[in-house]
Image: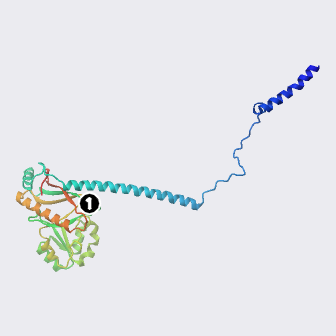
């Protein structure tokens, strides 16, 4: 009995000694409870977006988009400038190759390609490929050819019957006022040139959208509006109007019935008038001619020297 009591007293003391030696191992582990949204005294609630902060964030996004678009446009401008500089350098350093022909030889080949075709439908066209500087607008002008390739139909818009009659005697195909405007609106008449007196300009407002894209709308800037319409008809006889379309300039300068010498003279006169128009342009850098091509209606295109 004595021994059992001593052992029963010794066991609790031994367990307490172990608990003090290794408390984490022998102490009972209590289950922990985690709250769904723990909140302590130091936590701060999340602030909602106020209208001012949302507007500022939206403005930052728009500013970033604007900067991105500006960078893209700047890169496109640099790429365009590099390509333009390369084209202009190639145009300056054009070398004479066996592919290039003189104008008289090229005209002989084109006339041979149109054998058996009606002379009225077979024409010879000159095409200029240009190396334009940046931000260059279209170039237009008038060239006086030694021999016109076709008879041009000219319309004169005027309210004065006497001026209309004088214009018809001077070589105009159509002349008149409101009646002529109605015929143009209905598509009954077509022409290649037009002149007008200042008093007839209000009548042309109804056909402005029809004549403007074709370059047939009379305007004071182009010199096709004047009181002396008969004088304009006399000075415009034998003149050919041209206008660049992007990097290409195309104009009909002869017919296949012309002799090679006549074709050569027309080409030389056209190139002289084109170079004069370049000198009179307001652009800082003039366009350069990289290629000159002569072609016929059904024939090939031939690169020529000029």
Relative height, residue 13 to residue 206 (above, below): above
Q: Nearer the viewer, residue 201 or 238?
A: 238
Left or right placement of residue 212 versus residue 241 in this view: right
Residue closest to the far right: 1
Q: Nearer the viewer, residue 147 or 129?
A: 129
Q: Quadrant of residue 273?
A: bottom left
At which x and y percent is residue 284? 25, 65
Tag 1: Cα neighbours inside 10 Å, few (<14), some, or many (≥20)? some
> Which residue occupies 92% across, 20% down?
3
Left or right placement of residue 117 versus residue 180 in this view: left
Q: Which residue is mark 1?
A: 133
At which x and y percent is residue 24? 75, 33
Q: Quadrant of residue 281?
A: bottom left
Left or right placement of residue 8 versus residue 187 in this view: right
Work out which quarter of the rendered image holds the C terminus and state it.
bottom left
Q: Secondary structure at mark 1?
A: loop
Visible in this render: residue 188? Answer: no
Relative height, residue 103 to residue 282 (above, below): above
Q: Nearer the viewer, residue 159 or 65?
A: 65
Visible in this render: residue 14? Answer: yes
> Which residue occupies 40% across, 56% down?
71
> Which residue occupies 57% across, 62% down?
52
Work out which quarter of the rendered image holds the N terminus and state it.
top right
Left or right placement of residue 189 versus residue 41 in this view: left
């Amino acid at each position: 009995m004595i021994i059992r009591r001593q052992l029963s007293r010794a066991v609790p003391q031994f367990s307490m000694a172990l608990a003090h030696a290794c408390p984490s191992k022998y102490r009972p582990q209590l289950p922990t409870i985690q709250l769904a949204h723990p909140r302590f005294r130091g936590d701060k609630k999340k602030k909602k977006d106020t209208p001012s902060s949302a507007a500022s964030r939206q403005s930052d996004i728009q500013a970033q988009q604007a900067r991105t678009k500006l960078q893209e446009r700047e890169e496109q401008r640099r790429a365009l400038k590099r390509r333009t500089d390369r084209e202009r350098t190639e145009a300056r350093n054009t070398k004479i190759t066996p592919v290039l022909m003189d104008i008289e030889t090229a005209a002989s080949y084109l006339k041979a390609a149109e054998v058996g075709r009606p002379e009225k439908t077979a024409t010879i066209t000159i095409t200029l490929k240009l190396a334009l500087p940046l931000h260059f607008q279209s170039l237009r002008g008038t060239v006086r050819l030694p021999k016109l390739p076709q008879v041009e139909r000219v319309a004169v818009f005027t309210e004065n019957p006497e001026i209309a009659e004088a214009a018809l005697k001077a070589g105009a195909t159509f002349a008149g006022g409101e009646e002529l405007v109605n015929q143009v609106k209905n598509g009954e008449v077509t022409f290649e040139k037009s002149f007008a007196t200042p008093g007839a300009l209000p009548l042309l407002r109804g056909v402005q959208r029809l004549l403007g894209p074709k370059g047939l709308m009379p305007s004071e800037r182009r010199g096709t509006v004047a009181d002396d319409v008969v004088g304009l008809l006399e000075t415009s006889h034998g003149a050919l109007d041209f206008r660049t379309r992007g990097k290409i300039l195309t104009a009909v300068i002869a017919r296949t019935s012309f002799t090679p010498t006549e074709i050569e003279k027309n080409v030389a006169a056209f190139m002289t008038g084109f170079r004069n128009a370049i000198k009179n342009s307001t652009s800082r850098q003039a366009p350069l001619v990289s290629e000159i091509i002569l072609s016929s209606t059904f024939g090939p295109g031939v690169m020529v020297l000029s």
